[in-house]
């Protein structure tokens, strides 16, 4: 795949501590994600996310992640946290995702052997700001630490897209070179345990993506 952008965006997801949020900002990541999916080990409460949001540096986006949450739940979290972007990992359709008046990413499960829909992504989610290709199977949470077959990524999703699933400091360079995504999203690959990030792994991950950006 040919690169479309000169700099790969980086998103750290599943943060649960203000110190990790501050370090992410200092390392120059573009966005941090807070998980509100009901069954996730990285789930935080709206008040916690609101407090951590204040640790963000200017120009770093806050992303609220959902998976089949109710409309009322999403509205309440948007009201409390005021995220700059929403991310949906469940069966949500375009009408649901866009109903909150906040730009959204739609996660596309790439795990398992289920046949992909023949309808182009841009037709299924015309109002999405972008897509995130993750290794989870339909109905599963993300953050599994598994890598999927990158050759399955659609050649032209029609919008900016992020690569996720099993990324870490050891494969970030290879993944970025091989797929040339608009952005990369990492969670378990920079953790000591679910939700608890490791500063050294965070730094190494950023360094490897930036090294790939300099590679021709």
Image (spheres, rainbow, N blue to C red):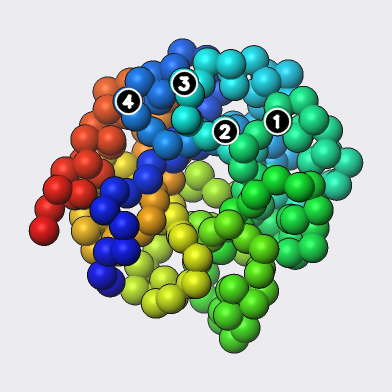
| x 38%, y 33%: residue | 29
Tell me the tag on residue 57.
3
User: Can residue 149 be spotted in the picture?
Assistant: yes
Measured from the top left, where is residue 93 in percent x and y?
75, 64
In the rendered structure, the answer to whether residue 102 lies left or right of residue 30 reads: right
Disc 4 to disc 2, C-alpha distance: 15 Å
Q: Please rate how many residues cluster around mark 2, counting C-alpha atoms within 10 Å: few if below 14, some from 14 to 19, many from 20.
A: many
Of labels 2 and 1, earlier in sequence is 2
- Placement of the C terminus among the 4 image quadrants: bottom left
Tell me the tag on residue 27.
4
Q: Please rate how many residues cluster around mark 1, counting C-alpha atoms within 10 Å: few if below 14, some from 14 to 19, many from 20.
A: some
Disc 4 to disc 1, C-alpha distance: 23 Å
Q: Secondary structure at mark 2?
A: strand
Measured from the top left, where is residue 33 in percent x and y?
55, 35
Measured from the top left, where is residue 16 in percent x and y?
56, 23
Q: Secondary structure at mark 4?
A: loop
| Residue pointed to by mark 2 | 62
């Amino acid at each position: 795949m040919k690169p479309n952008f000169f700099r790969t965006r980086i998103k750290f997801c599943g943060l649960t501590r203000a110190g990790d949020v501050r370090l992410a900002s200092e390392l120059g990541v573009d966005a941090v994600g807070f998980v509100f999916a009901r069954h996730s080990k990285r789930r935080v409460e709206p008040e916690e996310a609101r407090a951590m949001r204040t640790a963000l540096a200017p120009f770093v986006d806050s992303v609220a992640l959902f998976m089949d949450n109710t409309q009322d739940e999403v509205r309440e979290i948007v009201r409390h946290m005021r995220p700059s972007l929403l991310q949906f990992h469940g069966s949500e359709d375009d009408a649901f995702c866009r109903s909150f008046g906040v730009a959204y990413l739609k996660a596309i499960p790439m795990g398992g052997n289920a046949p992909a829909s023949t309808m182009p992504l841009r037709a299924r989610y015309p109002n999405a700001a972008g897509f995130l290709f993750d290794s989870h199977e339909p109905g599963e949470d993300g953050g599994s630490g598994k890598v999927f077959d990158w050759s399955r990524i659609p050649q032209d999703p029609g919008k900016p897209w992020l690569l996720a699933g099993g990324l870490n400091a050891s494969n970030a360079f290879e993944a970025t070179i091989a797929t040339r995504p608009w952005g990369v999203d990492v969670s378990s690959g920079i953790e000591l345990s679910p939700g608890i990030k490791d500063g050294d792994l965070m730094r190494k991950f950023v360094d490897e993506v930036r090294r790939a950006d300099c590679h021709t």
